[in-house]
Amino acid sequence: MPITPTPKIWMNGELVDWDKAQVHVLTHTLHYGTGVFEGIRAYATADGPSIFRLTEHIKRLFESAKILGFSIPYTVDELVQATKDTVASTGLDSCYVRPLAYLGYGEMGLNTLPCSTEVAIACWPWGALLGDEAVTKGVRMKISSWTRHDHNTMPPAAKTVGNYVNSSLAKVEALKAGYDEAIMLAPNGLVAECTGENIFVARHGKLLTPPLSAGALEGITQSTVGALAKDLGFEVQVDNIARSDLYIADEAFVCGTAAEVSSINSIDDREIPCPGPMTLAMSEAYLATVRRENPKYLDWCELTI
Ligand code: PPE
């Protein structure tokens, strides 16, 4: 999806013009993948743009940097405010937001210790990642031939730039084979997650989703879905899922900030009932919550002013 430019991007403490938000070709992260990022969404509400679980996303950015062993030269509060300022500067009522902390120009080589950390926050309009009809029609999934990272290879709990080479390999493989998205298994063969989403399956009336230990990112949407599912009276279990659990699921869906809640209609050409009633209920509850229509979770909806 081509990016639509917006007026400003926040870079190292100031809002700069979109076209001026550039880095040198010898930027460390460009060579070694040594950055961390987030994906956040702002939704239109009667009170202006509301950024969903913004503070938790920014906290996860700091945790990702901590896992990589570098520090971000701002506080969580400063980057929360910077994100709000960036969204406000665009004049958009809804958008996708991409904070990126990267190691900058000035040092080369694999030792990251002398590198400076730079931060940029950009936002632009971005529709549902897997398409507008992903909830009702569902997406075709393929189990990837690529394995998700092992914890001692590339920590999957960190949203590291370099980790996404693995996701891109799986995504392109799935698209070229005629599928919409890939499911990735951990080195031990258990289900981890998708290239840019967590996965849920419904079996025996219960919703199951893999834990961080299975190589999944601890998704903020996954946690939102977990809370909303309990409110709807669904039992939710964060537990290991085997490949066969996928094929014989009563329903299945993916969730993430960019993808929101999207139904799965087949996995490796095994049909999954779609759209399932639990999936539809979760999608509806999710969209109402992010749009500030669920009074229980107004704290999750952070207004820009
Ligand atoms: N797993 C992965 C690998 C992942 O990248 C994401 C977010 C999730 C799970 C869900 O996390 P959360 O957004 O906290 O619920 N993926 C981001 C980037 C997607 C992209 O294609 O780029 C996102 O959804 O913003």
Image (cartoon, grey):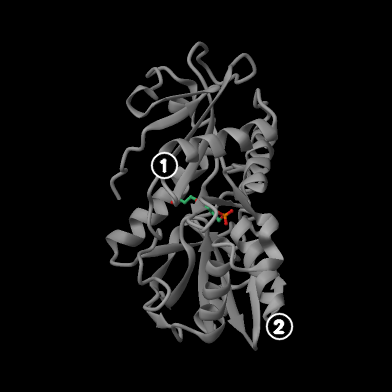
Taking 24 as reference, is 101 left or right?
A: right
Residue 296 location in percent, x, y?
71, 67
Taking 229 as reference, is 148 left or right?
A: left
**Residue in view at x 39 percent, y 55 percent:** 171
Residue 7 location in percent, x, y?
36, 33
Residue 210 location in percent, x, y?
64, 65
Quadrant in the picture for the C terminus: top right
Query: Is the CB atom of the residue marked by disc 2 within 8 angstroms of ligand 1's nearest atom?
Result: no
**Residue in view at x 71 percent, y 73 percent:** 237
At label 1, counting other C-alpha atoms closer than 10 Å, the crowd grade (few under 14, some 14-19, many 20 or more) is: few
Figure check: 88 above or below 140: above
At label 2, counting other C-alpha atoms closer than 10 Å, the crowd grade (few under 14, some 14-19, many 20 or more) is: few
Earlier residue among tags 1 and 2: 1
Figure check: 287 above or below 111: below
- The label on residue 91 is 1
Which amino acid type is marked by label 2? Gly
- The label on residue 281 is none
Residue 77 location in percent, x, y?
69, 34
User: Which is closer to the viewer, label 1 or label 2?
Assistant: 1
**Residue in view at x 59 percent, y 60 percent:** 221
State how far apart marks 1 and 2 are (Cα): 39 Å
**How many numbered circles are shown?**
2
SS label for mark 1: loop
Q: Which residue is mark 2?
A: 233
Is residue 113 or residue 61 the one in the foreground?
Answer: 61
Q: Residue furthest front?
A: 46
Which amino acid type is marked by label 1? Gly
Q: Residue 107: in sight, yes or no?
A: yes
Figure check: 276 above or below 13: below
Is residue 162 or residue 300 the one in the foreground?
Answer: 300
